[in-house]
Amino acid sequence: MNSVDLIEEKQISSSGIFQTMKEMKHEQVDFCHDEETGLKAIIAVHNTVLGPALGGTRVWDYKNEADAIKDVLRLSRGMTYKSAISGIHLGGGKAVIISDPRVPKNEAFWRRYGKFVNSLQGKYITAEDVGTSTREMEFVAAETSFVAGKPAYMGGSGDPSPVTAHGVYLGMKAAVKRWTGSDSLEGKRILVQGAGHVGQYLITQLVKESAYVMVADINENNLATVTNTFKVEVVNPNDVYSVDMDIYSPCALGATLNTNTISELKCAVIAGAANNQLEDEEIHGKMISEKGILYAPDFLINAGGVINCYTEVAGIDRSMSKDLTAKIYDKTLEIFDTAAKENISTHKAALLLAESRIKDIARLKSIW
Ligand code: NAD
């Protein structure tokens, strides 16, 4: 199951996209179809109260259009909360391109996509996500200035993955601090699911701190990159949830935390990079708390990447991305405190904090 399963299929087909947008509070959704290049893209702008909607472009071979719409709606909403809780001046948006990420795409394809992004006149700013990299952003930038994550030689902030991984590492350490009283990861059994861009940088930090690292991936090449570099234990992707571990770190796709997997999981902490880890925020956030597992909310601890893009968009010194990402440690502890005090899930505590910032600014904007 992946993140597209998060909104029930019937929810969109029976009630319609406008009803879903109303329920999820989206501002706009735009579609682009280009016969020449074969581009089929959707941009969702969730909320622009705090600033332009920034979010990456995901290329995925969705099994149908409804799945692509579901994914873009959920991912863009997540971006709103991610930027809000990180204290940066950005709203939430996301784009998906319906295509097999393994099939190479030419310059014309990406420039046509750049024109689509440009047509939103800055309401949406794109960047990389699963299936895209700095290379694609370079082509996109030929048609629009509303793009972040450009290569460093173009003055961009480059690949956001190392910063994302660092934030996840800090969030994980904060969770371990709350669990054991010390934030040391030495000797902790940590399973990283997904050895892609973020997973590989995260594993580097975990190994450096002498954690016992286990890794699962469906991509043999990515797995080999890690096993050729580090002494790690390889776990079959189908066995991930039954492994004896201290920390589960989802760094692949979303919705891996559902009724079945949570029942199986044997860990003290969940802290990973994947977006939308909870299949159902309310039900599964609560289920994890009741099981006594400490969950570091995804959109809080994986915000390093959007923070990195923010420095590029706002034209502020790149070193600020390190400073802003460092705050994830204390903020994660703060969220754990709020959740314990209010007797709510850590996910809910993080959502409420993000929402309160958006509501404050929205209220002020109605007066200005
Ligand atoms: P990536 O595509 O580089 O890596 C994902 C990895 O997960 C791949 O190696 C893939 O083979 C593996 N994978 C997919 N399904 C799997 C499964 N069922 N079991 C095991 N492995 C599986 O993506 P990434 O950039 O590393 O991002 C990882 C996650 O973090 C995504 O959910 C992404 O949205 C999220 N995220 C990334 C960033 C960033 O800066 N790259 C920022 C925030 C959030």
Image: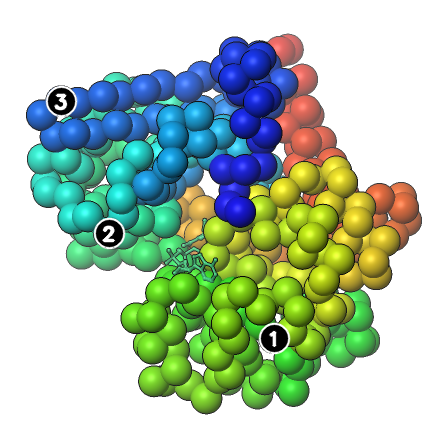
Residue at image mark 2: 102
Which is nearer the eye, 247 or 240?
A: 240
Q: Earlier in the sequence, mark 2 or mark 3?
A: 3
Front-lying residue, 307 or 239: 239
Q: Is residue 257 left or right of residue 306?
A: right
The yes-or-no answer for disc 3 within 8 Å of ligand 1 is no
The amino acid type found where label 2 is placed reads Arg
Q: Is residue 199 visible from the viewing direction of this image?
A: no
Tell me the quarter of the picture where residue 140 sits.
top left
The amino acid type, in three-letter code, at marker 1 is Ile
Question: In the image, what residue occupies the spot 32% across and 57% down?
Answer: 159
> What percent of the width, then of the height, locates residue 77?
54, 32
Q: CA distance from mark 3 to mark 1?
A: 46 Å
Q: CA distance from mark 2 to mark 3?
A: 20 Å
Instruction: Tell me if residue 284 comes above or below residue 108 in the rendering.
Output: below
Q: Position of residue 317 (x, y in %)?
A: 38, 53
Camera-near label (1 vs 2) is 2
Give left or right: position of 33 versus 225: left
Residue 244 in view:
yes
Kindly identify which residue carries mark 3: 35
Tell me: residue 89, above or below residue 204: above
Between the C-alphas of marks 1 and 2, the distance is: 29 Å
- Percent of width and height locating residue 114: 21, 31
Colour approach in the figure: rainbow
Lower position in the chain sequence, tag 1 or tag 2: 2
